[in-house]
Amino acid sequence: MKVKEAKKWLMERLGTIYDDNESANIALLVLEDCIGFAGTEIMMNKEEEITVNQENKIGKYIERLLQHEPIQYIMNKSWFYGMELYVDKAVLIPRPETEELVDWVVKDMKASGIDVFPKEATDADVTTQLKILDIGTGSGCIALALKKMLPKAEVWGCDTSEEALNVARRNGAALDIRVDFQGANFLDEAQQKFLPTVDIIVSNPPYIPLSDSTAMQQNVVGYEPHIALFVPNDDPLLFYKAIAHFARKRLYENGCIYLEIHEALGEGVISLFKAEGYQNVELRKDMQGKDRMLKVVNGK
């Protein structure tokens, strides 16, 4: 089988459960992982014969893909903010919308004039300028991206799942990015006391009402960790309440909270924070025009 034939076969099989665009994207990822060609190399080498071992590997991938298993879990890798991350079923697959949240923080820090960008390599060891906490860190994608972009910041990530923390620590080690990943059930106030006081809180917490699961794609609801996705139908703002309360005690004055939110719950989250006494609240749309991000300033 030639490379071009393998691509065509993959797209035909994937087309039974995905649209044309997604089928093409997944097919390219499969070929890249199984035969080693990346991007334009696939087209440049389309007439090349693939080996029996490569063909067998592709066959195993398609068996799992047709069960709706995400390609990222099959490959055990995903990409986020220019970083290749290890992922497995213990963590959510990083999304482009979350990259936008990270970008908001980075641009605000650049505009603030805070000295978090080292002039020399040794400056990265000086972490007194800015303290950041990522709540519900999962794969560590947010915390690691922020530390990568703001090297002089001191960054923590917390999660209730020890399996997720193992993934985050593995990613930090592989990328040689220093983030302190801590175990904590954030909904337990007794455990919150072990978390630091910071300048920035950032979080992509669970926010999908459990009732929404019936309308979600099988590759998400069937494989990604429910603990990181869903909240009770009768309390969808559960984590935002906890963050608002925590920040009153552990966020420095004029510090900021950056949150990813459910597109349908923007006004509800705004009302929650204002009811808690936060007056400076900004709602921002993502690239698809959905209410997806919120910034809250802990000021008077």
Image (cartoon, rainbow, N blue to C red):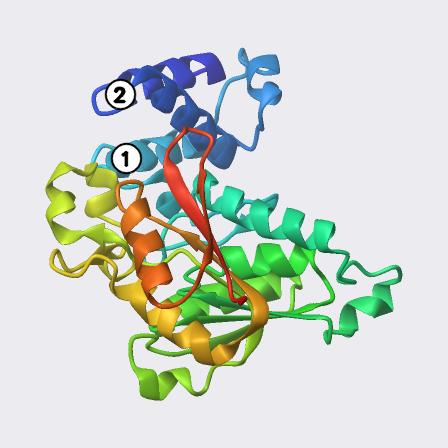
Q: In the rendered image, which quarter is residue 120 located in?
A: bottom right
Q: Which one is nearer the viewer's eye here, 189 or 175?
A: 189
Question: Going 39% across and 82% down the picture, which residue do you hit?
Answer: 192
Q: Name the image quarter holding residue 177.
A: bottom right
Q: Nearer the viewer, residue 239 or 281?
A: 281
- Which residue occupies the extreme right position in the image? 120
Q: Are marks 1 and 2 in contact (CB under 8 Å)?
A: yes
Q: Is mark 2 on a helix, strand or loop?
A: helix
Which residue type does callout 2 highlight? Answer: Arg
Q: What residue type is labelled 1?
A: Leu
Q: Estimate the spatial distance between the alpha carbons at disc 1 and disc 2, rounded to whole Å.
A: 9 Å
Q: Is residue 75 visible?
A: no
N-term-proximal mark, 1 vs 2? 2
Q: Viewed as shown, does residue 285 lie left or right of 62?
A: right
Look at mark 1 in the image and give the residue it sits on: 65
Q: In the structure shown, which secondary structural element does the residue marked by tag 1 occupy? A: helix
Q: Residue 218 carries which label?
A: none
Residue 131's spot in the image, x, y percent?
A: 62, 71
Q: How many marks on residues?
A: 2
Figure check: 234 above or below 32: below
| Residue toward you, 262 or 72 | 262
Q: Dot 2 corresponds to which residue?
A: 13
Residue 75 higher or lower than 91, as above or below: above
Residue 17 picture location, percent across and down: 22, 25
Q: Position of residue 203 (x, y in %)?
A: 43, 59
Q: Residues within 10 Å of mark 2 (few under 14, many from 20)?
A: some
As drawn, 48 above or below 109: above
